[in-house]
Image (cartoon, helix red, strand yellow):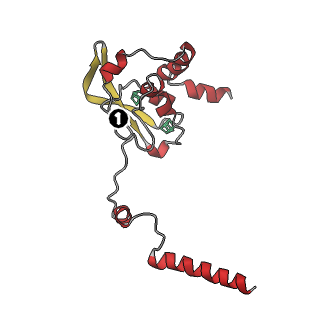
């Protein structure tokens, strides 16, 4: 019984210490003050330069959290291929299923970092014109499956209706 009381007191003291003196704090003070002062910027979700603007992420998103918006100026990626739109991800509608990233052709077809990510896309350095010339190394079946998502913006909703 005496030991139990000691354990309880020790636990209560440790918690009090944590609260009053911020001992065991994992978040560093600089980050803490940045959060409190609203200086933390939202992370980038789309790598706009290497994104090819295909709209696959927008089609694959089950919650319509991604909108394709017009670029001010179209960008020629390679002969016969011009980018006119770029995705914008609305985190408030996102359910973090990662379909957008996983169906991004740069990831799904070429095995490179996807140019969209619901948390933080990070730094994506790709030479798109060179990459698009490369042969893809995946099966015909997988290409057909991925192509559906890139081409048909009702595919997920149709599947949900069929359930
Ligand atoms: S992770 Fe979010 S934005 Fe991406 S497909 Fe899923 S719901 Fe849509
Ligand atoms: S699927 Fe990838 S390349 Fe296509 S628009 Fe979305 S982020 Fe860009």
The vertical placement of 29 against 58, above or below, is below
The vertical placement of 57 against 45, above or below, is above
| Residue 46, x across and y down, in percent | 37, 37
Residue at 48% in and 25% down: 108
Residue that sits furthest to the right in the current view = 1
Q: Quadrant of the N terminus?
A: bottom right
Q: Secondary structure at mark 1?
A: loop
| Residue 80, x across and y down, in percent | 30, 12
The residue wearing badge 1 is: 124
Residue at 44% in and 35% down: 66
Q: Quadrant of the C terminus?
A: top right
Q: Nearer the viewer, residue 57 or 67?
A: 57
| Residue 90, x across and y down, in percent | 43, 42
Q: Nearer the viewer, residue 1 or 83?
A: 1
Residue at 45% in and 26% down: 111
> 17 left or right of 128?
right
Indicate the quadrant where residue 37 lies.
bottom left
Residue at 33% in and 27% down: 85
Residue that sits furthest to the bottom in the current view = 2
């Amino acid at each position: 019984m005496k030991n139990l009381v000691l354990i309880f007191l020790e636990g209560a003291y440790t918690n009090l210490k944590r609260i009053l003196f911020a001992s065991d704090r994992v978040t560093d003070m600089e980050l803490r003050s940045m959060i409190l002062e609203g200086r933390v910027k939202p992370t980038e979700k789309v790598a706009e330069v290497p994104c090819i603007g295909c709209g696959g992420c927008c089609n694959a998103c089950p919650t319509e959290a991604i909108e394709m918006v017009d670029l001010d100026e179209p960008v020629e990626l390679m002969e016969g291929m011009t980018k006119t739109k770029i995705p914008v991800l609305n985190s408030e509608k996102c359910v973090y299923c990662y379909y957008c990233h996983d169906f991004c052709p740069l990831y799904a077809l070429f095995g490179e970092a996807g140019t969209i990510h619901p948390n933080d896309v990070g730094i994506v350095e790709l030479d798109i014109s060179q990459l698009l010339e490369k042969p893809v190394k995946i099966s015909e079946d997988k290409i057909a499956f991925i192509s559906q998502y890139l081409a048909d913006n009702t595919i997920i909703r149709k599947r949900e209706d069929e359930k």
